[in-house]
Image (tube, rainbow, N blue to C red):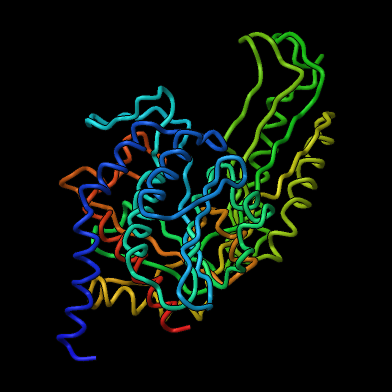
Amino acid sequence: MTALEIYTERHAIRKEANDIKDELISWRRFLHQHPELAFEEENTKQFIQKKLKEFGIESKILAKTGVVALLTGKEQGPTIALRADMDALPIQEENNVPYVSTIPGKGHMCGHDAHIAMLLGAAKILSKKNIEKGNVKFIFQPAEEIGGGAKALIEEGVLDNPAVDAILGLHVYPKLETGKITSEHGISCAACDFFEVEIHSEGGHGAHPHLTVDPITTAAEVISSLQHIVSREIDPLSSAVVTIGQIHGGSANNIIPSTVKFSGTVRTLDPEVRKTMEERIDRITKGVTQAHRACYQLNYQYLFPSVTHNESLIPILEKTAKDVLGEGKLTYSKPSMGGEDFSFYTEKVPGITFRLGTGNEAKGTTYSLHHPKFDVDEDALEIGTALIAKFTLNYLSNS
């Protein structure tokens, strides 16, 4: 392909995305103003279905609020799935913008509103392409934030009829400059698990601790000891995180309570290390509580495994980045210790994700994901839309 042909191809897909930029922004802002939590995405679901119908794409509902649609090519061929997550977070937004959330205590502070808008944009572009061979399956997934949406969709057959051969996902990323993307070789995100510990003892008067068994001091020692798992039990070359996110106990300054609860999360990259973490937490908790004459209950939940990128899709992502953005706009980074239930898809079929830069200091869009002032540089919407559409066309033409 000549330099002129490459230039023409790149700007063709960007122009198609740019032509619908105002719509992308409008869709994103509407969704941003009307956030809905996991498995509550009723209005979001209806909005998506309405737009898909306008594009001539029929859809169906799976997993209560998930929307799945299929675009069929002229000839049989591989099926590529494109996934966008839908749910918002239980966070009060603190932005002063015209499209601020209208729902108290709920906000799209992780960019899922942008993900939906970009996938709708890609659907609109692809619906006009008269695809020669293969199929495109659009997956609008509920409940990513609680890790249940992908699994529920898979259980209801989202990867079947027709069988999905590959899947693509993206996530906005405020720590990367708008106009750039990043991805990973192999493992992309950590496995994510939650745990809760409840310590039971004998409470009493704060002035007479010798007549009690103090669950607060016991919990403090358990929490401190749990940090030794990463620093002293895990190979330094095998990444792991143990974070305590909540602790609750007591009702007054002069009362030693009988119960304390704390909970946290475990993140691992190595599946073999992941298998050992429940036993390690249980062993340490048991030892410390017994030493202090208390007892405990441990509830350990395995949420989702690591996202693993299929290396066969890397060249397609590289070509897509070059086609849409030009040279040097795609970089590779280390795996993130964040979790993503996209991992349930990559357990079943070849998949890949990339992070779309949305950081712009002048526009104030560099706040981290899940921050109450998180926002998206809307200039990135057309970029993400073009990348999704072009990756799809590149995959189908190379299969």
Q: Nearer the viewer, residue 126 or 195?
A: 126
Q: Residue at x 57, y 73 (%)?
A: 165
**Between residues 130 and 366, which one lies in front from this camera angle?**
130
Q: Nearer the viewer, residue 377 or 200?
A: 377
Name the residue: 55% across, 49% down.
60
Does residue 181 appear anywhere in the picture? yes
Q: Is residue 369 visible?
A: no
- Quadrant in the picture for residue 177: bottom left
- Where residue 363 sits in the image (x, y, percent)? 18, 44
On screen, residue 128 above or below 221: below
The residue positioned 82% from the left and 14% from the top of the image is 211
For the N terminus, give its image quadrant. Answer: bottom left
Q: Is residue 87 left or right of residue 148?
A: left
Residue 270 drawn above or below residue 95: below
Q: In the image, residue 71 lies at what x, y percent?
A: 46, 63
Q: Is residue 381 above or below residue 125?
A: above
| In the rendered image, the vertical position of residue 143 relative to residue 342, given as above or below | above
Residue 41, position in %: x, y?
A: 50, 36
Q: How many marks?
A: 0
51 or 250: nearer the viewer: 51
State the residue at coordinates (53%, 71%): 79
Instruction: Where is residue 175? Give x, y as percent.
Output: 31, 54
